[in-house]
Image: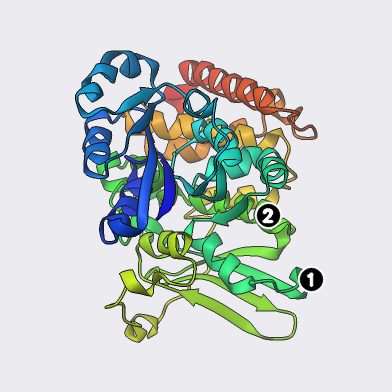
Amino acid sequence: MKDLIILGSTGSIGISTLNLIRKDKKNFNVKLLTTNNNIHKIYKQAVEFKVKEIVIFNKQKYIKFSKRFKKKKIKVFFSIEEVYKKRNNKVFLTINAISGIDGLEPTLNIIKYSKNIAIANKESIICGWKFIKKELKKNKSNFIPLDSEHFSIWSLLNGDNVNNIKKIYLTASGGPFLRKKLSQVKNIQPKYALKHPNWKMGKKISIDSATMMNKIFEIIEAVNIFNLNTKKFDILIHPKSYVHAIVHYKSGLIKFLAHDTTMEIPIASALYSDDANQVFKNNKFQYNILNGENFIKPKVSNFPLLNLLKYNFDKTYFEIILVSINDELVKKYLENNIPYISIVKIMLILLKNPYFTKYYKSSPKNINDIKIMVEKSKKFLNEYLKLNVKNN
C-alpha cells in the first residue's frame, strides 16, 4: 500500500484526491489529513478513510473541536511539526492542496517526510520556490506539479532540452466574462463571477480565473518550475478547456496536451505514475471538442491584469506583494466590500506605489521575510482602502 498525506483535504483538490482513492482503497493508506476551518468535512473524511491523525491549523477550532475526534481514536494536532517531531519515515506521496500563501510553511515542513510531493498550491511556488527547491534537494524528494497547465508542460517536455523551446502557451478558459467587456461587469456580484463555465473550483481561484490573475500566477509558477524566462510564455484563451498547454519548439515541432476538465487526471498520474488507466477505464478521446474555433488571443482591454506580464518575475519581493494584495482584494470582493472592478484597478495602482517598488530588486532570505512582507502588503492595502474605496 502507498502511504499518503493530503494537506488541505477539505478543499477541491483534496476532495478530488479522496474521490480517486475511494475507487481503489486497497492500494492506498491515508496517514494524515489537514484543514484550516472545515471540521465537519475532515471528520467525515478521517472516519471514512480510517485516518488516525489530522492537523487543524486554525488554533481556535483546534482547541474547540479536538475532543470530538477522541471517540474515533483520531489524534488531532495543531502543526505538522507536532505530528512528525519524533519520526524519520517518509510517506510515498504528499498532495499539497492548501489554498493561499498559508500553504507555504506546511509545504516546507512536510518535504522531509515525503518521497514525492505534488503541489497544487500556486502561492507556495510563486513566493517560496527557492526554499522549496532547497528542501527538495536536501531531502532527495521528487516534485510533481499538480496544476493542470504545469502538469501538462512537465509531461510534454519529459526531459527535452529547454534550450530548444521557442514558446510555451498556457491556455485559459476566459472565465465567466469572456464575451463581455470590462465595463459590463465592473459592478458584477460575486455569485456571477464564481460561475466558472468549465471547472469546479474554490471561490478564490474562481475569481482569479475571472480576472485572469490565475493565468498570471501560472506563468510565474512556470518560470520558477522550468527555469525559463518570462518571455518564453504566452497565454491563449481556449474556451473549451480541453487543451491545457502547447509547447512550440525551434525545430517547428508543436506538442499539445489535452484532457477532460477534471483535476482527477493530473492527480491520478501523481498517485499511479504510468498506471492511472485503472481509474479511467471509460475515458474517451473527445475529438469533437477540438473542432471549430478554439483558440483566441486575450485582449488586455477585457483583462487589464495581463499588463502584469510586462514585469520581470525575478523571484523578488514583487511576487510576494502581488500575491498578498490579490488575496486581500479577492477576499474583500467576496465579502461585498469592494466592487469587481476594484480588484483590477487597485492592483495596478498599488504595484506602482513607491511603498512597494523599493522592494522589487531585493529578495527574501527566509520564510520569515516572506511572512513580514505579506503582513506589510495587506496592512498597506487596507489603509489604502479606508481612504480610497469610494473612488475605486
Residue 211: x and y, percent?
45, 48
Circle 1: residue type:
Asn
| Quarter of the image with the N terminus in it | bottom left
Q: Which numbered disc covers residue 223?
A: 2
- Against 142, residue 363 (above or below) is above
Q: Which numbered disc covers residue 163?
A: 1
Residue 144 location, quadrant: bottom right
Residue found 53% across the figure and 62% down from its top: 151
Circle 2: residue type:
Val
Q: Is residue 107 left or right of residue 8?
A: right
Q: Secondary structure at mark 1?
A: helix
Q: Residues within 10 Å of mark 1 (few under 14, many from 20)?
A: few
Residue 183: x and y, percent?
39, 48
How far apart, in angstroms, are the residues tagged by discs 1 and 2?
Answer: 14 Å
Nearest to the observer: residue 96 or residue 232: 96
Residue 232: x and y, percent?
70, 64
The answer to whether marks 1 and 2 mark residues whose Cβ atoms lie closer than 8 Å is no
Residue found 27% across the figure and 14% down from its top: 64
